[in-house]
Image (cartoon, rainbow, N blue to C red):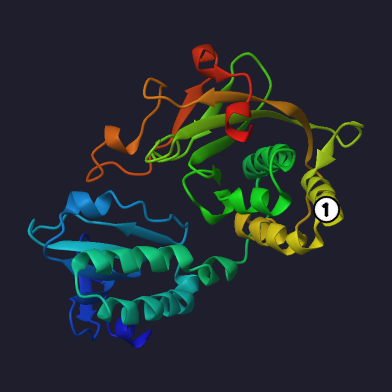
């Protein structure tokens, strides 16, 4: 499969070199761009750019998925590009999985659905990545999600709780329970509090019945602090608790941790945290201040990141989540 890219040459800025994959029905290009990054383009003749851009493809650090604006406005391609050349073999296998599915599709809608489905199911690519130790911001984020998972343990069954934890799979919402979504954030204590919203999809209600922003307070502390814990200690506490209820769920929990980027081989002994078990709940309504995909032109703007200040959001506070779990 890599031979499809091996003969391609580096072109000028904004240009690509390409050849064709064999396909009975579709125009599918193997590409190499100015930065010598390889990719694949699927041509669409009937579906519009806006329609394809509204598909919420999963996001990975290693690849980009987009619909580029080309010189010929009538040419429409879905573009999947590899960002990290260290993963060319894995990327090649990923495309090998997609191509047979493409030839089984007879309509552009079914082709788009097949590509989307394969992107979501392709977990081998993520598993093969050798993760570096989580930085302090990612540690805080994981701790917040774990402590919300701890809250769910009191409301629903262990396996159902862990299965509802979708954040590690890079889904737009950290937790999905039925038709309700939950986005979990961690902030430091203090009067000037804010959280980072890292996507135009995170606070997008879509077709959910309800969406909630959950905010924990997580602060750095010293190893000498008797209330402090490091990430490895927190994870081990969760494993022991899960094992005491249902040992069959430990593997599922470990899979989620691995997908998030946590590894027992990493040394977290120097980062200690103090966590408030209580959390603040905000209900995301149409009036809630946010930037969502409907507010932007995806042809020009993508991957919106912004800080949301919490000091004046009292009107959106919820006392609890009983209306969901009762």
Quarter that holds the C terminus: top right
- The secondary element bearing badge 1 is classed as helix
- Residue 288 percent location from the top left of the image: 42, 22
The answer to whether one can see residue 313 in this image is yes
Quarter that holds the N terminus: bottom left
Q: Left of 225 or right of it: where is 86?
A: left
Q: Quadrant of residue 106?
A: bottom left
Q: Left of 75 or right of it: where is 85?
A: right
- Residue 71 percent location from the top left of the image: 10, 57
Q: Is residue 36 above or below residue 237?
A: below
Q: Is residue 261 above or below residue 139?
A: below
Q: Nearer the viewer, residue 155 or 14?
A: 155
Q: Quadrant of residue 310?
A: top right
- Which residue is drawn at the image coordinates 18% and 53% (left, top)? 49
Disc 1 crowd, CA 10 A, few/some/many (<14, 14-19, 20+)? few
Q: Nearer the viewer, residue 18 or 58?
A: 58
Q: Nearer the viewer, residue 12 or 125?
A: 125
Q: Is residue 46 above or below residue 295?
A: below
- Residue 135 percent location from the top left of the image: 65, 46
- Residue position for label 1: 245
- Residue 220 percent location from the top left of the image: 75, 32
- Which residue is drawn at the image coordinates 19% and 49% (left, top)? 50
- Which residue is drawn at the image coordinates 71% and 37% (left, top)? 151
- Which residue is drawn at the image coordinates 50% and 72% (left, top)? 86
The answer to whether one can see residue 134 in this image is no
Q: Is residue 170 above or below residue 309?
A: below
């Amino acid at each position: 499969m890599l031979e499809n890219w091996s003969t391609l040459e580096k072109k000028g800025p904004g240009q690509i070199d390409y050849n064709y994959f064999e396909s009975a029905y579709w125009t599918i290009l193997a590409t190499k761009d100015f930065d010598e990054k390889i990719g694949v383009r699927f041509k669409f003749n009937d579906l519009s750019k806006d329609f394809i851009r509204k598909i919420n493809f999963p996001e990975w650090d290693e690849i980009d998925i987009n619909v580029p604006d080309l010189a010929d406005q009538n040419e429409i391609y879905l573009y999947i590009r590899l960002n990290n050349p260290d993963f060319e073999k894995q990327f090649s296998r990923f495309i090998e999985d997609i191509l047979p599915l493409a030839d089984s599709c007879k309509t552009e809608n079914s082709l788009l659905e097949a590509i989307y489905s394969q992107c979501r199911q392709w977990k081998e690519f993520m598993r093969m990545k050798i993760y570096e130790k989580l930085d302090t911001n990612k540690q805080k984020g994981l701790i917040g999600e774990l402590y919300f998972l701890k809250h769910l343990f009191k409301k629903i069954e262990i396996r159902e709780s862990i299965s509802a934890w979708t954040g590690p799979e890079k889904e737009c919402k950290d937790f999905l329970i039925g038709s309700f979504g939950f986005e979990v954030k961690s902030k430091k204590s203090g009067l000037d509090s804010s959280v980072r919203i890292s996507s135009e999809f995170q606070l997008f209600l879509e077709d959910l019945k309800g969406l909630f922003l959950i905010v924990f307070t997580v602060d750095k502390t010293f190893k000498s602090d008797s209330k402090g814990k490091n990430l490895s200690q927190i994870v081990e506490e969760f494993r022991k608790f899960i094992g005491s209820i249902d040992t069959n769920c430990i593997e599922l929990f470990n899979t989620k941790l691995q997908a998030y980027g946590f590894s027992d081989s990493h040394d977290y002994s120097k980062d200690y945290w103090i966590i408030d078990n209580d959390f603040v709940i905000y209900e995301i309504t149409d009036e809630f201040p946010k930037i969502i995909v409907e507010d932007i032109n995806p042809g020009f703007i993508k991957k919106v990141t912004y800080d949301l200040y919490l000091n004046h959001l009292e009107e959106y506070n919820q006392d609890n989540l009983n209306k969901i779990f009762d």
